[in-house]
Image (cartoon, rainbow, N blue to C red):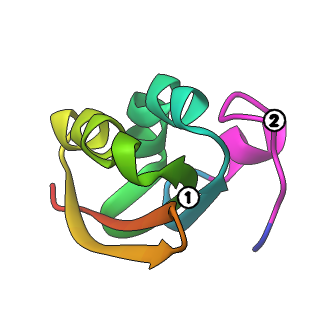
Amino acid sequence: MVAYSDGYSSKIVQQNVPYDVVLANILARPLIAMAGDMFNSLKPGGYAVISGFVDEQVDWVVGEHQKYGLELQKIYEMDNWRAALLKRIK
């Protein structure tokens, strides 16, 4: 199933948790604010791809997701934009 949602509290998102994969292409501050919700929405072993932040924000954005138990798998680069592949380990 694929669905679009503005955050994690929408009915369609909550009816179908947990997910194998979550994609989020938004800016750094919203990614950080929703890091806990992303973790809670992923199955153990699930992946998240986050993007919409720049090189100077990588430690800040990825670090917040790591606090919740998401492990960085890879950083992707295009010009100054960054994307991260994260995995829920537990």
Start-end of magenta stretch: 3-16
* Amino acid on which the number 2 mark rests in the picture: Lys
Query: Residue 38, image x and y in percent?
Result: 47, 42
Q: Which of marks 1 and 2 is nearer the N terminus?
A: 2
Q: In this view, does 56 lie to the left or right of 87?
A: right
The residue under label 2 is: 11
The residue under label 1 is: 51
Q: Helix, strand, or loop for circle 2?
A: helix
Q: Helix, strand, or loop for circle 1?
A: strand
Quadrant showing the C terminus: bottom left
Q: Nearer the viewer, residue 48 or 74?
A: 74
Sort mark 2 into few (<14), some (14-19) or many (20+) by Cα contacts within 10 Å.
Answer: few
* Amino acid on which the number 1 mark rests in the picture: Ser
Main SS, magenta residues? loop
Quarter of the figure with residue 60: top left
Magenta stretch holds residue 51: no
The dot on residue 43 is: none
Sort mark 1 into few (<14), some (14-19) or many (20+) by Cα contacts within 10 Å.
Answer: many
Query: Residue 8, image x and y in percent?
Result: 65, 35
At horizontal 45% and vertical 75% (from top left) the residue drawn is: 77
Quadrant showing the N terminus: bottom right
Query: Residue 5, image x and y in percent?
Result: 81, 45
